[in-house]
Each structure stands twice: as structure tokens, then as C-alpha cells.
Image (spheres, grey):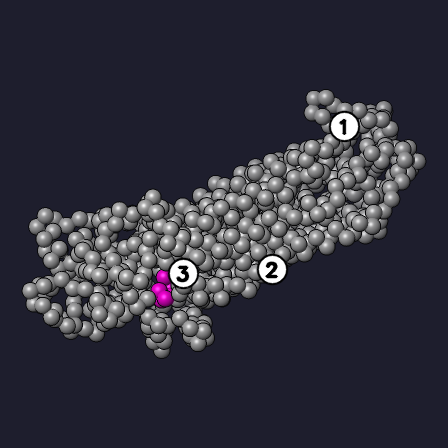
């Protein structure tokens, strides 16, 4: 059924060139033309993307239907007569709803902005859960379930492993299928993963924090039975890994099909902005996760139970599981509206007609195969699709550059709070909140600014790659800040001897003459800060004999500590770590902000360059392949590699009845050194890959091949290649 003729210059694109037709109209008196009214072909004789065409008629729910450059009154009638007619296939449903339930009120959301809102909420929840809550509670989970850093790194990497397993299938078949349904079911699976991640809290016994106050100070009863159940808690890492696996499965469509669904349903020069907003929500999610997760960590994990330790105590375990319950429930709810969207939005077909390709030109011309509307609909085309992408060197090196950036992002987002916790002697909740303050403006602002710059300066593919190169070089220079570090707070028996002399690296000397008769156990770690500014392993190791409570802050204060030197009299000690007064703290935080800013500033431009250097029909599949490369080479090994490096910088390991547990204290200088080496290696590689991608990129000739449905920033469309010209009066 033919719809009314479109009287505007399709969404504000002002055509400066002519659109010619190879066949004269069967009705000479009718200057209007229809695309594919019989055979489903476009003006160049090439079938449209899905073999059918759709209505371009303005709709109340079409937010992008208003023109940005309107015709003059004298041209209005001409356009009505000579405009393009869009034909909608009757079997294609463009209404928003579930099955036959499509109420009119829902059609208000059936716009590109409506889709953007719900996808932003989904990406916010995904970022808050996977990159926020998990990274925030990693220290608490290690402590609660006796995990080492490399084991927690495996938990973080399970997300990327699942994504690698699902990406090929989802991006290939979902790219040619009903994208909103894939997206909705993915968000639902992601919500189930969050609920599963919180399950161990309800299936384990109550957490027993063995504080020094319970065991006794110097001279008290120090005997502690070894709990056989403690070692079995580490098996719960497999439940966490399964929850992360479901997170990865559910989020796979979000950053492949979600991006292409947005790109297909908005104007080309608006696409980077829409995608930037989408990714900004994904960046703000982790920031909110750090802040909210840090608040939850100030609540004891066994809610309502009285406990004799404070959040500053290293034995404290916060309510790490609350956030996952809330995020899981919210994900289940947000999946419902996403499932109701149509395969494409009303009026979106017009963008395909007006696109000019920027895809990399392969020498043998094999890139033209992707213009076939039937290409990619069967499994038989999968090897050819992969081969076409492998022949595209710009795409390959953009993938490798993304992998290097992903390694640093994954590693630092997982262990960034732990880095701050060690460098500045913070509690886990304070470190998570601090890291959130860095990520909100730097990560979120950088992501949005990257998309804004691409749109503002109307950058083409080669210019976008150069912008990515500039950002990578800038962050490379800023990463040299890790040459400096904050010194460790002095700790008797760990970083120095009790008499103040140096302690050989790798050795512990927790016993001294001042605590020899106390009978202290190494299994009982509860650091205290002495009045002499030195930390001690526990009140017992500080030789403290009495305990009281400071009513001002609720902290325990220990008295008559024989190892704490305060003039000639025994000093006192306060529960918790000593506060760091590192003078380099502002400088270190400032340059960390710069590194995060420029790293995220290149993310949207790099994604936009990937979308533009491949043909339109391969966009979803190209993003899927890119995410496989990024996760295989970056997301998966990143947390594992960083966790192993951080383990190497450990000074004091937990001792549980002869078995090594989690790390209590790290050597700050070694931690900074390893971070610097990793940062330099990956940033240099990223810079190299962006340079090669820019040099090897071969743009298409000025007049693009027909049917190459990609986007042009200025909206000009040239579809007259290989077609004889008609008289000039048939210009549109």
C-alpha cells in the first residue's frame, strides 16, 4: 500500500546532486517515483537492505521526521510531485507492543529517543553491575570467601569469556534478525546473572570476624580452632563465575546489536551523538556502582547483627550482595519494554536510501559482495563474512588497538580501588568511593566528548582514526605519573623491625622482646595504629593489655602497649590503619584523571571508525568480531594479568591454619612499578596500531558504488553510478 509522498528533503538532508532513474515512468504524467513497488529495488536497481521497503510517511511517533532544512514555498509543490514515495510491506509490523497488544500510548515511545532511553538504562545497569559493583566488592569477596587476587581475576574475566563464546552467534544471526528481541532477552539473562551472583550470601553460614578483642589482648586466651569450612568457601568462586558468565551472555547483544540498531534508526551525523550518549550511560553505570557499592560496604554483611569491629578494620566484610539484588530486579523490569520494540523504527528506511559508503576498499573488489541483500542470511555466508573482515586491514588494526585499551581498562577497573586502597591507606569502601569520583567526570565526560567531537567537526573515517591516535598518545604521556608512588605506612615486623631498623624484603618478624610473652597468633590480623605513628599487626603484637572504646568515633582504643614507644611510658593504639599523609596524592590523582579521560575519549571515535570502515550489512557482525578480539586479547587476560602482578607485590599474606589466603598488605613501590610497565607496553602498542590503521585505510572514490548503504556526514547521496542519465528536469 503506497503511503503519502514525502514532501521534505528527507530529515534535513539537502540534495545537491541529481538522482536519476534508468527506466522512464510508465505514466508520463506522473513524475513521482516509487522504490521497489514491484521488485523491492532501489533507484539503482539494487534491492534494499531487507528486500522490502517501508513507509517514509511522517508519523506522530517519528521523532526524526521533521526537516532540518525546509524547502522554499516555490519548491514545495515541485517536491510533492517529484518526491520519493516509500512503500511499506503490509506484513512488517512497525508498532511498539507485545504481539497483538499495541496500545496507542506506547507509540509515544516508538522513536529513536525512546529506544535510546531504554538502552541507556540497560547499559547503565550493566555497567553498574559488571564494572561497578563487582570491582567494588572484589576485596570483600576475597576476604569473605578466602580468594586470592588471581581467582578474583578469573571471576572478572568470566564475563568476557561468555561474551567471546556468544558474540559470533549473536552478532551474525541477531544482526539480520529482530534486534530488539535479542536485546530484551539479553537484558533478562543479565538480570538472572545478578541474582545468581548474590546467591552465595544466602547459602553460606554467618560470617565470623575473628577480631583481636574477641581473642584477647596481650596475655589473653589466644587459642583459635582451625575451621575446616573456611577452605571450602573458595569453591563459591564457581558460582560467581557462573553469574558473570550470565552477565556476559546477556550483555553481548547490548554493545553489538544495540549500537547498530541506534545507528540504523537515526541520521548519520547524529549517530555518533546517540552512540556517545549510550556509552556515557555505560560509563556512568560503573561510577554509580563504585559510589553506591561503597555505601553498601559500610553496612555489615550480616545485616542487623552486632559486631565489635568497624569498617576500617581489615576483617570487616560489607553488605556486598545488596547491589546485585537491586540491579537484577531492575534488569528484569527494563527487559519488558525493550522486547516490545519493532524490528525497525517508523521512517528509518529513508536513511538507507541516502547513504554513501566510507568502507575500506579492498583491492580485489570483494567488499562489493556485502552489498548483496541476501548476503549474510545463512550460515553458508559466515566464512565469507569473516574473510571479508580479515581482508580489511583498517578493521583489523582498529580491533587490535581496542584490545590494548581494553586490557588496561579491564585491569584498572578491577583493581583500581585496590590500588588506591594500598597507596593512600584507605578502607575498601573509601577506596571504592574515591575511584568513583575519578570515573564519573573522566570516564563519562570523555566518552560523551569523543562522540561530540566527531559530530562537531564532521570527521570522516581517516580523521576519526587520527583523533584516536591523539588521545592514545596523550594518555601515554600521562601514564609516566606511575613513576611516583606513596610510601607504605611503616608496620612493625612487616616493613621494618620493631626497633625501627630496616627489614629484609620478603621476611616477617612479628615477634619481639616487647610481645614475646603475649603468645600472639599470626592467624589473627587486626591492624592498629600506634600513638608513635607505626602500624602493628594486632593489639597483641603491639603488646597492648587493656581496651576501651572512644565514644567520639566508636573505635576501640588499646592501652598499655609495651611495643608502642611514647617517650619512656607505654603508648596506646587505635583500631584500624594509620592515615596516610602522602604529599604526592594530589599529583597522582590528577594524572590518573588525565589517563582515564583520554582513554575513554577515544572509545566512541574508535567505535564510529569501525562502523564506517566496513560495509553496512556487516556492521553488527563486525562489532561482534571486534568484541571477540577485544575480549580475547584484552578483557580476559587483563584482570588475570593485573591480579597476578598485584599478587607479586604482596608483602603480607593471610595465614589460615598453614594455608595462604588473600593479601593483607601490598608494597606500594612494586605495585606502581608493575602498573607503569603494563601501561607503557599497552599504550605503545595501541599507538602503533592506530598509526598503521590510519596509513592503510583506503577510502572509496568520491562517487560511491550503488547500494553501499553507509553514511555520509553532509547527507549528499550519489546513486547514479552504472546508470544512464535522464533529463535534468527529473532531479529530486
> Which residue lies under the disc numbered 1?
556
Circle 3 sits in a helix, a strand or a loop, which is it?
Answer: loop
Against 611, is 377 above or below? Answer: below
Q: Answer left or right for 61 relative to 690.
A: left
The residue closer to the viewer here, 18 or 342, is: 342
> Which residue lies under the disc numbered 2?
637
Measuring 45% from the left and 49% from the top, which residue is drawn there? 336
Q: Which residues are magenta?
A: 608-617
- The spot of residue 540 in percent (x, y) is 85, 35
Q: Answer left or right for 16 relative to 227.
A: left
- Residue 351 occupies quadrant: bottom left
Against 403, is 544 above or below? Answer: above
Q: Nearer the viewer, mark 2 or mark 3?
A: 3
Numbered circle sitting on residue 238: none
The residue closer to the viewer here, 616 or 570, is: 616
The residue furthest top is 551
Amino acid at each position: 500500500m503506497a503511503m503519502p509522498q514525502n514532501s521534505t528533503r528527507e530529515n534535513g538532508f539537502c540534495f545537491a546532486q541529481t538522482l536519476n532513474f534508468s527506466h522512464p515512468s510508465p505514466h508520463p504524467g506522473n513524475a513521482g517515483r516509487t522504490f521497489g513497488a514491484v521488485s523491492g529495488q532501489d533507484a539503482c536497481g539494487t534491492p534494499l537492505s531487507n528486500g522490502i521497503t517501508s513507509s517514509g510517511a511522517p508519523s506522530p511517533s517519528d521523532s526524526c521526521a521533521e526537516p532540518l532544512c525546509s524547502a522554499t514555498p516555490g519548491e514545495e509543490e515541485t517536491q510533492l510531485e517529484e518526491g520519493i514515495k516509500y512503500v511499506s510491506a503490509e506484513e512488517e509490523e512497525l508498532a511498539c507492543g507485545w504481539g497483538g497488544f499495541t496500545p496507542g500510548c506506547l507509540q509515544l515511545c516508538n522513536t529513536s529517543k525512546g529506544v535510546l532511553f531504554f538502552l541507556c538504562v540497560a547499559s547503565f545497569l550493566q555497567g553498574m553491575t559488571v564494572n561497578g559493583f563487582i570491582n567494588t566488592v572484589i576485596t570483600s569477596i576475597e576476604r569473605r570467601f578466602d580468594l586470592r587476587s588471581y581467582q578474583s581475576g578469573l571471576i572478572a574475566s568470566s564475563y568476557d569469556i561468555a561474551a567471546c563464546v556468544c558474540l559470533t552467534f549473536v552478532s551474525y544471526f541477531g544482526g539480520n534478525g529482530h534486534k530488539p528481541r535479542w536485546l530484551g532477552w539479553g537484558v533478562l539473562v543479565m538480570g538472572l546473572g545478578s541474582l545468581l551472583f548474590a546467591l552465595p550470601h544466602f547459602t553460606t553460614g554467618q560470617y565470623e570476624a575473628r577480631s583481636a578483642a574477641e581473642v584477647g589482648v596481650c596475655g589473653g586466651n589466644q587459642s583459635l580452632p582451625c575451621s575446616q569450612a573456611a577452605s571450602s568457601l573458595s569453591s563459591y568462586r564457581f558460582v560467581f563465575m557462573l553469574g558473570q558468565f550470565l552477565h556476559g551472555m546477556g550483555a553481548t547483544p547490548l554493545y553489538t546489536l544495540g549500537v547498530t540498531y541506534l545507528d540504523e534508526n537515526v541520521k548519520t551525523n547524529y549517530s555518533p551523538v546517540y552512540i556517545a550518549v549510550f556509552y556515557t550511560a555505560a560509563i556512568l553505570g560503573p561510577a554509580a556502582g563504585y559510589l553506591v557499592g561503597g555505601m553498601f560496604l559500610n553496612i555489615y554483611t550480616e545485616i542487623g547483627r552486632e559486631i565489635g569491629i568497624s569498617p576500617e578494620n581489615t576483617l570487616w566484610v560489607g553488605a556486598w550482595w545488596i547491589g546485585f539484588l537491586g540491579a537484577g530486579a531492575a534488569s528484569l523490569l527494563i527487559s519488558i519494554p525493550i522486547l516490545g520494540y519493532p524490528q525497525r523504527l517508523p521512517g528509518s528506511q529513508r536513511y538507507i536510501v541516502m547513504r554513501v559508503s566510507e568502507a575500506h576498499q579492498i583491492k580485489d573488489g570483494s567488499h562489493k559482495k556485502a552489498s548483496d541483500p541476501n548476503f549474510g542470511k545463512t550460515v553458508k555466508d559466515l566464512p565469507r563474512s569473516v574473510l571479508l573482515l580479515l581482508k580489511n586491514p583498517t578493521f583489523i588494526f582498529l580491533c587490535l588497538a581496542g584490545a590494548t585499551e581494553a586490557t588496561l581498562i579491564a585491569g584498572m577497573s578491577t583493581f583500581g580501588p585496590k590500588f588506591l586502597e594500598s597507596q593512600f591507606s584507605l578502607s575498601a569502601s573509601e577506596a571504592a568511593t574515591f575511584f568513583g569520583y575519578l570515573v564519573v567526570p573522566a570516564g563519562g565526560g570523555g566518552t560523551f566528548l569523543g562522540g561530540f567531537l566527531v559530530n562537531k567537526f564532521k570527521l570522516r573515517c581517516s580523521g576519526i582514526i587520527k583523533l584516536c591516535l591523539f588521545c592514545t598518545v596523550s594518555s601515554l604521556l600521562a601514564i609516566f605519573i606511575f613513576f611516583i608512588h606513596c610510601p607504605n605506612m611503616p608496620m612493625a615486623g612487616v616493613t621494618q623491625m620493631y626497633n625501627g631498623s630496616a627489614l629484609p624484603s620478603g621476611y616477617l618478624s612479628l615477634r619481639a622482646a616487647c610481645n614475646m610473652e603475649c603468645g600472639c597468633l599470626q592467624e589473627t590480623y587486626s591492624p592498629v595504629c600506634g600513638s608513635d605513628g607505626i602500624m602493628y599487626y594486632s593489639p597483641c603484637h603491639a603488646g597492648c593489655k587493656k581496651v576501651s572504646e572512644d565514644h567520639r568515633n566508636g573505635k576501640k582504643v588499646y592501652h598499655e602497649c609495651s611495643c608502642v614507644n611514647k617517650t619512656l611510658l607505654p603508648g596506646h593504639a587505635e583500631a584500624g590503619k594509620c592515615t596516610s599523609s602522602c604529599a604526592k596524592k594530589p599529583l597522582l590523582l590528577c594524572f590518573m584523571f588525565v589517563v582515564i579521560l583520554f582513554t575513554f575519549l577515544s572509545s566512541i571515535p574508535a567505535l564510529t571508525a569501525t562502523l564506517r570502515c566496513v560495509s553496512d550489512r556487516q556492521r553488527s557482525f563486525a562489532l561482534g568480531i571486534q568484541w571477540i578480539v577485544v575480549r580475547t586479547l584484552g578483557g580476559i587476560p587483563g584482570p588475570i594479568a593485573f591480579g597476578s602482578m598485584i599478587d607479586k607485590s604482596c608483602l603480607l599474606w593471610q595465614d589460615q591454619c598453614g594455608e595462604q589466603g588473600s593479601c593483607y598488605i601490598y608494597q606500594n613501590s612494586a605495585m606502581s612499578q608493575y602498573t607503569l610497565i603494563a601501561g607503557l607496553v599497552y599504550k605503545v602498542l595501541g599507538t602503533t596500531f592506530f598509526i598503521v590503521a590510519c596509513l592503510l585505510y583506503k577510502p572509496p572514490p568520491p562517487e560511491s558504488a550503488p547500494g553501499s548503504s553507509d553514511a555520509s556526514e553532509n547527507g549528499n547521496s550519489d546513486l547514479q553510478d552504472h546508470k544512464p542519465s535522464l533529463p535534468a528536469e527529473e532531479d529530486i
